[in-house]
Amino acid sequence: MVIASPGTLLLAAALASPTIMSAINGDTDIDDAALRFLICVPVAAIMMAVLRALTSDFGPSLGDRMSATLRRRKEDAPVEGEPPVRAP
């Protein structure tokens, strides 16, 4: 779980934006806005981790992408020490 990634910090700023705007306008103390932002950072990190976990099954995995790029064509010359290419 990456806590200080740009996406996490942006989401934390969006979650704490009402208090941040209130601090900018002078209605709320800056300490309260900073505390709210610091509380929102781990909450945003957990939200991003849950989203990442939910969407990890969609699309090809890293192993599938690597094996697709490392496959040889049938007409390629055989590499010494490797088994011959089998037809699919």
Image (cartoon, rainbow, N blue to C red):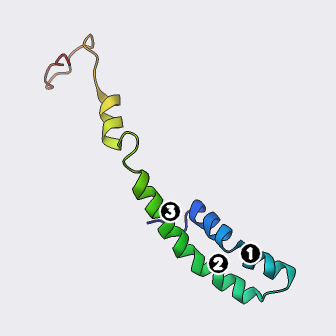
Q: Is residue 57 visible?
A: yes
Label annotation for residue 18: 1
x and y percent of residue 5 in the render? Answer: 55, 63
CA distance for labels 3 and 2 = 16 Å
- Closer to the camera: disc 2 or disc 1? 1
On screen, residue 67 above or below 25: above
Which kind of residue does numbered mark 1 sit on?
A: Pro
* Total residue callouts: 3
Outermost residue to the right:
25
Residue at point 41% right, 55% down? 54
Looking at the image, which residue is at 13% across and 23% down? 83
Numbered mark located on residue 70 in the image: none
**SS for tag 1?**
helix
Mark 1 / mark 3, whichever is N-terminal: 1
Residue 63 placement (x, y as % from top left) = 30, 41
Separation of marks 2 and 1 at Cα, in angstroms = 10 Å
Q: Where is residue 87 in the image (x, y as percent from the top left)?
A: 18, 16
User: In the figure, is residue 18 to the left or right of 62?
Assistant: right
Q: Is residue 16 above or below residue 27?
A: above
Do the CB atoms of the residues marked 2 and 1 lie less than 8 Å apart? no
Foreground residue, 35 or 75?
35
Instruction: Please state which of residues 70 and 39 is positioned toward the viewer in this rendering.
Output: 39
Q: Amino acid type of disc 3? A: Met
Query: Disc 3 marks which residue?
Result: 48
On-image quarter of the N terminus: bottom left
* Amino acid type, callout 2: Phe
The answer to which of marks 2 and 1 sits earlier in the sequence is 1
Left or right: residue 84 compared with residue 72: left
Visible residue check, residue 3: no
Q: Mark 2 points at which residue?
A: 37
Ranked by sequence position, the earlier of labels 3 and 2 is 2
Residue at position x 37%, y 39% from top?
A: 60
